[in-house]
Image (cartoon, rainbow, N blue to C red):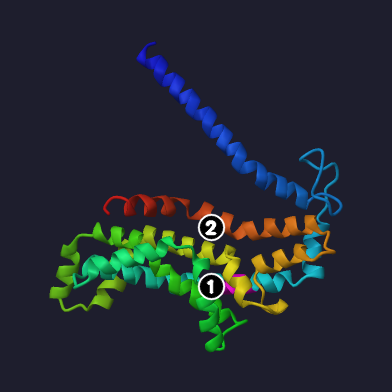
Amino acid sequence: MTRKAKTTLWLSFSYVLLAIIGVFCVYPALWVTMSSLRVGDALYSDTIIPSALTLEHYTNLFDKYLFAGWYVNTLKISVASMIIGTVLTLLTGYAFSMFRFAGRKNLMSLLLVLGLFPGFMSMIAIYILLNQMNLLNTHLAIIIVYAAGAPLFFLFSKSYFDTIPKSLVEAARIDGAGHLTIFFRIIMPLSTPLIVFTSLMTFTGAFTDFIFAKLVLRTPEKKTLAVGLFDMITDPFSTEFTTFAAGCVLVAVPITVLFILMQRFLVDGLTAGAEKG
């Protein structure tokens, strides 16, 4: 077999494999979307495309449930967590990249190890702390938990800042600039891909999280989308599964739009952070 034939065969295999992966990725989303437009409450159907389409389930979300309130709560928590978490993550990465101090490597290793543990392992301790601070059933508690956990994933920002020439920082220091001035007026304008990547990851994590929101939030008006939709179908007498599918579609809209709009910055942030460990 010639080299050209081997290349053609390998490319054909790669395209077939990618097509199969694409079908596995797209099919569940398409199935949920079509289910949200199906007449009735049952998710099961002989065909993926329903014979009759309806938008009734979307209107039911706003008429029968506090879906609009859940959406506002989720956006409020996600945006606040994104802003605070991004700033904390970038400051953590900047400190580890620019400063040399005793115990730096040990502290980095500790944060990396802590970041490997699943978040639900700390649920009981967080619940007790929030209870002692009288913050249960408040959105502030969720924002604090999400924002405080964000710096554990500082490695991308630290790796990105390592690629910025130290001469820029040293020149600014000679001119009398402080570290906060250097960070916000020199480092930040050079870190757009990193900021977009960190913001998007923090926003997505807060927007889709269920465990901590379910642990802390109790009253219906305080619920987020994940908790509200979960409670919608866990009722023993609940049969509105197609309405649940409609809610899932609306939940996916902002995240999908953000990923499409920020795709270029997302790729740049990932590759730039991988250049230097």
Residue 168 figure quarter: bottom left
In this view, 231 is above or below 272 = below
* Residue in the picture at 43% in, 68% down: 150
Front one among 146 and 136: 136
Q: Is residue 242 magenta?
A: no
Q: Is residue 75 magenta?
A: yes
Cα–Cα gap, marks 1 and 2: 30 Å
Residue most extreme to the left: 174
Provide the residue span drawn in magenta. 73-77
On the image, the x and y values in percent for residue 185 come to: 29, 72
Residue 55 figure quarter: bottom right
Front one among 110 and 245: 110
On the image, the x and y values in percent for residue 139 come to: 58, 79
Q: Tag 1: residue type?
A: Met
Q: Is residue 27 left or right of residue 141?
A: right
Q: Tag 2: residue type?
A: Leu
Residue most extreme to the top: 1
Give the class, few, some or many, for how many residues have Cα within 10 Å of label 1's Cα (few <14, many ≥20). some
User: Looking at the image, is mark 1 or mark 2 nearer the viewer?
Assistant: 1
Q: Is residue 202 left or right of residue 253?
A: left
Residue highlighted by disc 2: 258
First reached walking from the N terminus: tag 1 or tag 2 = 1
Residue highlighted by disc 1: 123
Residue 235 figure quarter: bottom right
